């Protein structure tokens, strides 16, 4: 019997909810898994869920695992700042870190009509097929779980079952540092050699590419349709979510290994709830619903909704919106952004017409257009940007168009295509300081974004450029000032500064809530530096009150 005939994860609908997360603390995803198991068991969640992510560095050990397999002394471990967490799954100690793709399927085995063994075989098969896509021939080991390449371990399996529902899952080494494995006996195996796809291939392999192939083979092996959703949209009732205290005990009433391991895990130093200056009443009314319904009936998307912008209610109520083109899924995995990854459709050639028609019906005189990043397209979507600009100009007399564009992977011709369509403002956000790019924007380059802004400023005829920066990700004052200077030196003189807000607990945490008076101070700093127009405040976003900033710039 074929593998796929054994593994229908959702027999009711043939679909499985899929959630892409970025680099996530282990304790956060552990709590989330337990939430999902409780919701699935209670019947509130009627479909299985699979999470794909990476972890911040962590050692995990199974419920009966032997800590003697941590072969470095405690002082060395503390110096490395890698916590050890004991959890419910079987097996011994292992390591997780950035560059390793981890999958956590929450599967109702009874509904799927499969055994635990068949489930584990399917997870191994998904990893084997993914490795083959990158030219690495991996296989099972008849004695030890996981997948292996000539005696070297490439991927690991660890599964727990509660109420007949699986959690925990698999880990496939892509391009992570293998050094931490030398500090343990991985999976309790003395002398075992660990490997990665990048090491076996002896060439660069990206996490994003591996994630995409894992989703493909998950659908193939399990014979299902993948339904990508944002973490915030999971249909879980609050009544099914347990408190931390309740989650600290298993169904027998005994403390879980999670609780037992707390003494060797340092709590994250993060700010408490939102401060008072980030709390405000949300406007409502017929204008808000009119805008939302018009956009949806036209089959369009807005960055306001996709990115969970805190200003969407205000903007919709004032009959403004920022159109999101090129689909609603992104090829990148920026760890601050709520737009889901994994575009599965080519661009819609009719989208420019619908954007223009919707903007006309909304009676807009200032239209802001942005997009997801489409690295899968030869021109990054530049031609569709240009066509949308032209369509809006034809549809509305005396309209102004601002575009917020991706970096087009540094392709100068793609940028020229957009500039040739004559937008009134070209915005490209730097987003964060140079040091945080590998953490927050791993597929972007700080220098490449500065070069784009420089090319806009030197374009003839001139088109005003604009850029923006988030605060609260852990940047220092010196780094902010250096970043502002770098932006200014490109010839960009329009600037926005706003507070980073974590879209979900699967995204980068807020390091600090910046008070309004500091935003005022940074505005003054930028103006003294030479910027002509600066919007700075906790709720400021790149397209927030964009028309007002443009009007201000025209007064000069």
Image (cartoon, rainbow, N blue to C red):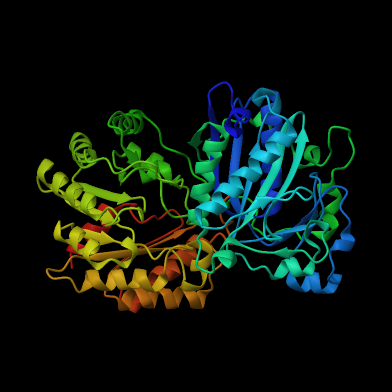
490 sits left or right of 137 in the view: left
Residue ID at (84%, 73%): 75
Q: Is residue 65 left or right of residue 372?
A: right
Q: Nearer the viewer, residue 165 or 284?
A: 165
Would you place residue 58 above or below residue 21 in this image? below
Q: Position of residue 158 (x, y in %)?
A: 74, 46
Measuring from the top left, give residue 155's x and y in whole percent: 66, 54
Q: Is residue 251 visible?
A: yes
Q: Quadrant of the C terminus?
A: bottom left
Across the whole image, how many numbered discs are drawn on residues?
Answer: 0
Visible in this render: residue 335?
no
110 up-or-down from 428: above or below: above
Residue at 73% from the left image edge and 50% from the top image edge: 141
Res 448 quadrant in image: bottom left
Q: Position of residue 199 (x, y in %)?
A: 59, 67
Q: Position of residue 345 (x, y in %)?
A: 35, 41
Judging depth in this view, the residue of 227 and 436 nearest the camera is 227
The residue that appears at 40% across and 45% down in the rendered structure is: 343
Quadrant in which the N terminus appears? top right
The residue closer to the viewer here, 316 or 355, is 355
Q: At 64% across and 68% down in the image, what residue appears?
A: 177
Q: Quadrant of residue 456?
A: bottom left
Residue 196: which quarter of the image? bottom right
Direction top: furthest residue: 12
């Amino acid at each position: 019997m074929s593998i796929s005939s054994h593994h229908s994860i959702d027999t009711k609908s043939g679909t499985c909810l899929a959630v892409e997360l970025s680099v996530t603390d282990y304790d956060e995803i552990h709590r989330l898994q337990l939430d999902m198991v409780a919701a699935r068991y209670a019947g509130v969640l009627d479909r299985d869920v699979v999470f794909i992510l990476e972890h911040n560095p962590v050692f995990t050990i199974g419920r009966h695992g032997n800590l003697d397999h941590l072969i470095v002394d405690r002082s060395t471990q503390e110096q490395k700042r890698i916590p050890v967490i004991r959890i419910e799954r079987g097996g011994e100690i292992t390591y997780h870190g950035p560059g390793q793709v981890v999958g956590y399927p929450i599967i109702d085995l009874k509904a799927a009509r499969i055994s635990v063994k068949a489930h584990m075989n399917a997870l191994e098969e998904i990893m084997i097929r993914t490795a083959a896509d990158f030219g690495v021939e991996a296989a099972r080991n008849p004695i030890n779980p996981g997948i292996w390449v000539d005696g070297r371990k490439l991927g690991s399996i660890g599964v727990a079952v509660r109420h007949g529902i699986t959690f925990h899952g698999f880990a496939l080494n892509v391009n992570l540092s293998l050094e931490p494995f030398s500090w343990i006996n991985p999976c309790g195996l003395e002398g075992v050699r660990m490997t990665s796809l990048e090491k076996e291939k002896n060439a660069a392999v990206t996490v994003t590419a591996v994630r995409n192939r894992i989703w493909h083979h998950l659908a193939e092996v399990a014979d299902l349709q993948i339904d990508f959703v944002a973490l915030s949209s999971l249909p879980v009732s609050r009544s099914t979510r347990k408190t931390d205290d309740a989650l600290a005990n298993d169904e027998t009433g005994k403390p879980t290994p999670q609780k037992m391991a707390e003494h060797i895990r340092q709590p994250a130093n993060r700010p408490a709830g939102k401060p008072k200056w980030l709390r405000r009443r949300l406007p409502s009314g017929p204008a808000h619903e009119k805008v939302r319904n018009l956009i949806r009936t036209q089959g369009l998307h807005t960055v306001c909704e996709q990115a969970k912008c805190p200003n969407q209610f205000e903007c919709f109520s004032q009959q403004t919106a920022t159109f999101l083109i090129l689909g609603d899924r992104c090829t990148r995995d920026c760890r601050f952004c709520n737009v889901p990854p994994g575009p599965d459709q080519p661009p819609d050639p009719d989208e420019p017409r619908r954007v223009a028609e919707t903007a006309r019906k909304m009676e807009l005189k200032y239209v802001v257009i942005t997009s997801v990043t489409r690295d899968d397209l030869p021109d990054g979507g530049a031609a569709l940007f240009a066509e949308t600009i032209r369509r809006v100009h034809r549809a509305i007399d005396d309209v102004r168009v601002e575009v917020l564009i991706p970096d087009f992977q540094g392709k100068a011709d793609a940028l020229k295509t957009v500039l040739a369509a004559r937008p009134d403002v070209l915005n490209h956000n730097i987003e964060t300081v140079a040091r945080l790019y590998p953490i927050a924007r791993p597929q972007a380059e700080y220098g490449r974004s500065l070069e784009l802004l420089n090319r806009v400023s030197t374009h003839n005829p001139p088109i005003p450029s604009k850029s923006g920066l988030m605060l609260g990700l852990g940047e220092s004052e010196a780094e902010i000032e250096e970043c502002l200077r770098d932006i200014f030196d490109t010839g960009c003189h329009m600037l926005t500064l706003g507070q980073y807000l974590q879209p979900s607990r699967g995204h980068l945490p807020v390091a600090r809530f910046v008070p309004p008076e500091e935003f005022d101070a940074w505005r003054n700093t930028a103006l003294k530096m030479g910027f002509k127009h600066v919007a700075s405040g906790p709720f400021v976003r790149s397209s927030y009150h964009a028309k007002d900033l443009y009007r201000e710039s025209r007064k000069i």
